[in-house]
Amino acid sequence: MSRILLIDDEKNILKTVGSNLEQNGFNVDAAISAEVALAKLDSNNYDVILCDLILTGMNGLDFLSLVRNTNKDIIFIMITANGFIDDAVKAIKIGADDFISKPIDMDGLISNINILLSKKANYYNENKPQFDTKLIYKSKIMEDLIKEIGMIAKAPSNILITGETGTGKELIAKIIHEISGRKGPFVGININAYPDSLIENELFGHAKGSFTNAINTQKGKFELASNGTLFLDEIGEMPLFVQSKLLRILQEREFSMIGSNAVIKLTARIVSATNINIESAVLQNQFREDLFYRINVFHVKVPPLRERKDDIMPLVYYFIKRFNAENKKNIVSISKDVEEKLMQYNFPGNIRELENIIERAIIITPFDTIEVDNLPNYLKKTREVQSIFMSSNNNTDYDLNLDSVEKELIIKALEKYNYNQTKTAASIGISRKQLRTKMKKYDLFNKR
C-alpha cells in the first residue's frame, strides 16, 4: 500500500481529500503545516507528498526545496489555486513531479498518482543499482557492512541489529526494508519509550470496548506493518511477559488484538535492535533464550564511530549541508583545529553526538567556518580528558583499552559532581540515559 503525506492548512481539505485517497487504497498521513510535515518525514517513509502551495508558515515552494535537498526520489505533487501557473512552473523547476489545481478533481489526482508511482517503479527497475544505502561513509568496515546487508535483506528471515546508542541502527533497518522488496510499510516502535502496561496495546492493538476508554478499535504495530517490516527498537528492554507473547506470535505467525478472539495473520518481517549485550542478558535470565534465537536468524553489528573514523569528515560535511539548509546559513568548512579535535575524540554518543555537535556549531557561528570556539566545552578539552588517563595510574604498562578509559572517565566525573547524574552526563557529552546504561555496565551504582 503506497503511503501519502498530505499537507494543507485547511482542515476540511485534509479530511475530504485524505478520506478519498484512503477509500482508493492509499495510506494517508495528514499535516496542517510544512513544519509538522518535516517532523513526520523524519520518522516515516512516504511514497508521495501532496502539498498545498500556500500554507501558514513555510510555503510549499520552500518546503519542496528542503525535501529535494535530502530526498530526490519521493514523488511530490503541488496543489495550486487557479491563476497560480507561474508558481506551478517554479515548483516543477525546483523538483515537483506534477501540480494540480483547486478545486481538486479526485479522479484525475488518483490517476496521476498511480501513473507517477508506476513510472517510478519502472525507473528503479531499469536504472537503479541493487540498492541505495542513504548511508554516509567511506570506511572499509562500513563497505563490508553494506555488502552483508545486500546479501540478507531480501530473505524473509528475522534480523537482529546490535550496536551502541547513536550508531544508526534504525537507519540500517530502514535500508534493509527498502531493499527487501516488501510491499508493506516500515513501522517502528521503541520498546523503551512505553511503560510495561502499554507495550501490549501498542504492539497488538485493541478492540472497541475491550477496556475503559477503548471507544474505538485501534490497530497495533503488528497489523500496521502487514507485508512490510516491523522494527522493534531496544528489544532488550522488552518485559519478560511480553517476550513470551512475542515468541508465541513468531512461532505461530498469528496474533489477536486485546479484547478480541479474531486471529490476524502475521505477515510482517521482524527486524529488532538493541544496544545492550543481549547474550549477557540471556545468561542473566533477563531475556528469553528461545526468543533470542527466533529474532537472531541474521545478526548485523553496526560499528561505533570510533571504529570508523574515516567516516567522520564525510559525515561532518553532510551535516553542515543539512543544517545550513535548515538554518539558512552558509557555512562552508571547519578549521584544521576543529578537524583535529573531532578526529581525536572517541564519540561515546556516536553519529548522533556528532550530528548534535555540528548542528550547535552551525547555529552559533557567525562566520563561514566552524572554529574551536563553536564546539562544546568538553570537546575543547579533548587532550585534557586524555591526560586524565595517562596520569590516573602510575603503572606505565597500564592497559588503556576503551572500556578501562571510559570507566575511569565516568568514575572521575561522578566523583567531581558528587554523583549527580545529570551534571555528570552533561560534562562528558552523553545523555543521562546513556550514563545510567554505562553505570550499570561497569557496576557503578553501588560504588559511592
Image: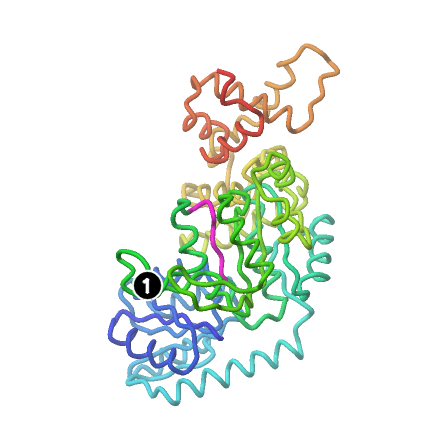
| Residue 423 is at least partly visible in this image | yes
Residue under the image location 52 percent in, 50 percent down? 233
Q: Position of residue 350 (x, y in %)?
A: 57, 41
Q: Is residue 15 left or right of residue 383?
A: left
Could you say which quadrant of the image residue 209 lies in? bottom left
Q: Does the segment drawn in magenta span residue 190? A: yes
Identify the residue at the far top of this view: 394
- The residue that label 1 is drawn on is 58
308 left or right, relative to 274: right
Residue 26 figure quarter: bottom left
Vertical placement of residue 328 versus 396, above or below: below
In the depicted structure, whether residue 23 falls above or below residue 250 = below
Where is residue 304, by image quadrant? top right
Q: Position of residue 37 (x, y in %)?
A: 37, 63
Q: Secondary structure at mark 1?
A: loop
Residue flagged by tag 1: what amino acid is it?
Met
* Residue at (59% x, 41% y) in the render: 164
> What range of the chain is rendered magenta?
187-193
Residue 119 in the image: x percent, y percent? Answer: 56, 83
In percent of width and height, residue 381 lies at 53, 26
Looking at this rendering, what residue extends furthest in the front direction?
261
Up-down relation of residue 385 to residue 115 (above or below) = above
Mark 1 nearby-residue class (10 Å; few <14, some 14–19, many ≥20): few
Tell me if residue 26 is in the magenta stretch.
no
- State left or right for residue 223 relative to residue 300: left
